[in-house]
Amino acid sequence: MNIAHFGSIIAIYIAPEEGAPTVERSQVRAVPGLGLEGDRNFIKQKQHPPEKRKPAKELTLIEIENIERLQNEYGFPEVKPGELRRNIITRDVPLNDLVGKRFEIGEVEVEGLELCEPCRYLEKLTGKKVMKPLIHRGGLRCRILTEGIIRKEDRISV
């Protein structure tokens, strides 16, 4: 199997409850069927039987390059990566190309499910009109396939 190393993780965020500000972590435990330990979606998923859980709620990623584009080209220099409510901020990873593919984030295997398009809720929380500039650049929703620890600076490979 050929392994292509893309980039790495530059930040990890979780939000302990719906609408709460995100909290940056240096590492987090990923659990199949649940998500990232301590995150609002992990807590919500755990309340449901396995057949009612939503894989697209387990993990989200976004490219720092798209955040920087939002800050520099679209005039939102004050937008911080954690405000966009994605769990993992990547560098040098073409996330849109990973829809339908399995890949590794450090020791954790995941599957790219769908693009994580921005929504009005994100605009409401940030108080900024970020939806239009983030269409098709809002990140990737993933299913977690193997349990493990994801760490800041972990490599991402396919």
Image: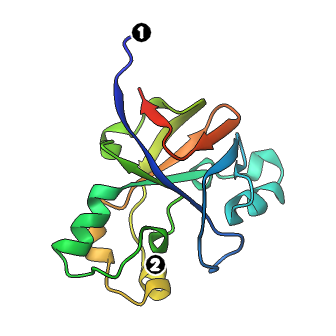
Q: Which mark identifies residue 68? A: none
Front-lying residue, 35 or 157: 157
Q: Which residue is mark 2?
A: 122
User: Looking at the image, which residue is at 60% across and 53% down?
Assistant: 26
Which residue is drawn at the image coordinates 74% and 60% (left, top)? 38
Marks 2 and 1, the one that precedes in the sequence: 1
Figure label count? 2
Counting other residues with Cα less than 10 Å from the Cα at mark 2, is it few (<14), some (14-19), or many (20 or more)? some
Outermost residue toward the top? Answer: 1
Identify the residue at horizontal 78%, vertical 61% (top origin). Answer: 43
Of the 4 image quadrants, the one containing the C terminus is top left
Q: Amino acid at mark 1?
A: Met
Q: Is residue 60 above or below residue 151?
A: below
**Percent from the top left, x then y, of residue 28?**
67, 49
Q: Answer above or below: position of 21 versus 23.
A: below
Label at residue 1: 1
Residue 65 x %, y %: 27, 56
* Amino acid type assigned to the residue bearing label 2 in the image: Leu
Provide residue 52's location: percent of width, then percent of height. 75, 52
For the question of whether residue 128 can be seen, the reply is yes
Mark 2: secondary structure:
helix
Characterize the local packing of mark 1: few (<14), some (14-19) or many (20 or more) Cα atoms within 10 angstroms: few
Foreground pick, 153 / 73: 153
Q: Is residue 4 left or right of residue 87?
A: left
C-alpha separation, residue under disc 2 versus residue under disc 1: 39 Å
Residue at 70% in and 66% down: 40
Asked if residue 3 is positioned above or below residue 132 in the image, the reply reads: above
Is the residue 72 above or below the residue 88 in the image?
A: below
Say whether residue 135 is visible.
no
Q: Is residue 100 left or right of residue 78?
A: right
Q: Quadrant of the N terminus?
A: top left
